[in-house]
Amino acid sequence: MQSATISFANFHNHGELFANILRARRDSFILRNRWDLPETMGMEYDQYDTPASRWLAVHENGRVLAGVRLTPTTARCGIYSYMIRDAQNGLLDSIPSDLLYTTAPVEEGTWEVTRGFVCSGIPAAIRHKVRMKLVLEMLRTSRVEGITRMLALLPSNWHRWAARCKLDMTAAGRNMNMGGIDYQAVWIDFSTQLH
């Protein structure tokens, strides 16, 4: 089992991995969750898949087991910035604008975590190992990119696995149901782990 952080600068070094992440996202969000999202050639994508973002994957023999997208809160592309902020500003119909307790930040060192998934076919016996591998890749990437904290939109059961994954997480907003799944915005503090 391996992990990788992909950017527009290095995805040519990873063969089909970037496309496989987008295929796994389609399986997770469009097929399994039945979300109405853009897709083409069997891949899910949106306006936040830009050169500003990074894509983390846990993979084995070309098969993506889990993944997540990271986007700096300073990102801009046309009228869009990052998903949570754009939702708060009323640009996204699918996410409530009152998802955060405070104003969405725009600051160096703070990145957003979205499109996180663990593939549904992963056996229960190794799910925790896969999740830990993804967390370790997030930690490695936070060191490389100088990320001190992340703002994530996660299933509301995040507190059940946060301690097991050794993540310092706190609620950043209210519980809300989106597409039949309960979600909550969450802060993840990486500041104590950057050295």
Image (cartoon, rainbow, N blue to C red):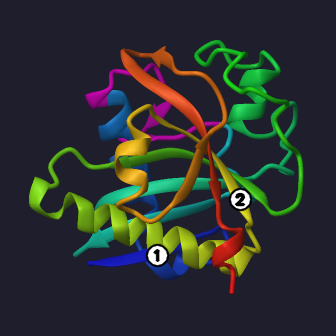
In the image: residue 185, left or right of residue 34: right
Question: x, y (%) of residue 49?
Answer: 63, 48
Taking the spot 41% from the left edge, 66% from the top edge, the residue there is 134
**Residue lying furthest bottom in this view?**
195
Instruction: Say whether disc 2 or disc 1 marks the residue closer to the N-terminus.
Output: 1
Question: x, y (%) of residue 155?
Answer: 43, 34
Q: Secondary structure at mark 1?
A: strand
Taking the spot 87% from the left edge, 30% from the top edge, the residue there is 79
Q: Is 148 drawn above or below residue 31 in the view shown?
A: below
Nearest the viewer among 33 and 18 is 33
Q: Quadrant of the N terminus?
A: bottom left
State which quadrant residue 188 falls in: bottom right
Q: Can the viewer see residue 9?
A: no
In the image: residue 63, left or right of residue 34: left
- Contact (CB < 8 A) between labels 2 and 1? no
Q: Can the viewer see residue 142?
A: yes
Q: Nearer the viewer, mark 2 or mark 1?
A: 2
The verdict on residue 45 being magenta is yes
Cα separation between marks 2 and 1: 20 Å
| Residue named by callout 2 | 149
Q: Amino acid at mark 2?
A: Arg
Q: Secondary structure at mark 2?
A: strand
The mark found on residue 113 in the picture is: none
Question: x, y (%) of residue 30?
Answer: 36, 29
In the image: residue 148, left or right of residue 37: right
Q: Quadrant of the C terminus?
A: bottom right
| Residue named by callout 1 | 4
